[in-house]
Image: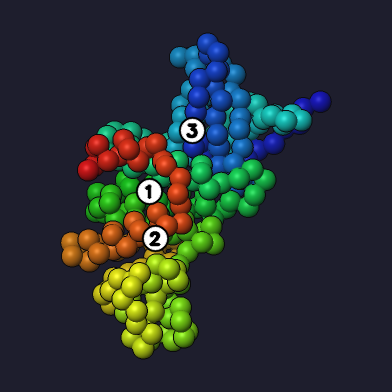
Amino acid sequence: MRSGVILMGMVLGAMPIGEYDKRITILTKERGKITVFARGARRPTSQLLAATSPFSFGEFELFEGRSTYNLKNASISNYFRGIADDPEKTCYGFYFLEIADYFAHENNDERELLKLLYQTLRALLSDALDNRLVRRIYELRILLAEGIYPNLFSCQSCGKKEGLVRFDFRRGGMICDRCISGEGSIAVDATVLYTLQYILSAELAKLYTFTVSDEVFTDLEQLIHRIFSMQVSHTFQSLAILKTIAG
């Protein structure tokens, strides 16, 4: 006997199954990442055709079996169509989805991850924000959501909160002017440090509400890239495509 359930979430990916069906991955508020079969979703006349495409966000009505979910209906509140209209934004968008897919787990509380992904895609649609900045904010903030973020608020050696001048990659955080060690660390400008601290501490609704100068962004990008690469060794397929489009 199958039971019905309504879950809120976003489609992270879709694969064709057979001639007309789809298998989709949804990041849900209630049950984390789940796999769902959508019968007939690839038929041109199917009401589920658009609802089972990546980026679709809304409520999904599912039949829950012993080991699988089957999609009955969907009420989509945001398709993020503007992303698909821009090749560069599309590449960034799929990169963000792939990161979320990598970190999310089934039957896990992924509400913060879902909220972050939603706000990030909204920021990606804004012409006022540099796509590159949106990417680096997302990469650092997702480390916070996963509990593997660096210490940017106090010295990793003595705990002092003032005079933080370098980031030590071996210790995974900032060090102060008294505990300075050039080996394995790089200097961090005060403006760059403030920006990093803001990314980790801001409310999600205010996360994508700032811009930085080209000089600050260059330093910010290099540091976040190294921090993210240090914590995440996975190779993201969408990143290779993004590099060909955005450089």
Residue 111: x, y in percent? 57, 53
Residue at image coords 56%, 46%: 104
For the residues labelled 2 and 3, say whether their Cβ atoms are less than 8 Å apart: no
Label 2 residue SS: helix
What is the quadrant of the C terminus in the image?
top left
Q: Secondary structure at mark 3?
A: strand
Label 3 neighbour load within 10 Å: few <14, some 14-19, many 20+? many
**In the rendered structure, which amino acid carries the disc numbered 1?**
Arg
Name the N-terminal-most of marks 1 and 3.
Answer: 3
Identified by mark 3, the residue type is: Gly
Q: Which mark is residue 96?
A: none
Q: Up-down: is 41 above or below 33?
A: above
Q: Disc 2 marks which residue?
A: 227
Q: Quadrant of residue 238?
A: top left
Image x and y of residue 50, in percent: 46, 26
> Is residue 183 rendered to the left or right of residue 13?
left
Residue underneath mark 3:
13
Query: What residue sits right under mark 1 in the picture?
Result: 122
Task: Please name which of the two marks, 2 or 3, marks the residue nearer to the observer.
Answer: 2
Residue at 32 percent across and 45 percent down: it is: 125
| Disc 1 from disc 2: Cα separation | 24 Å
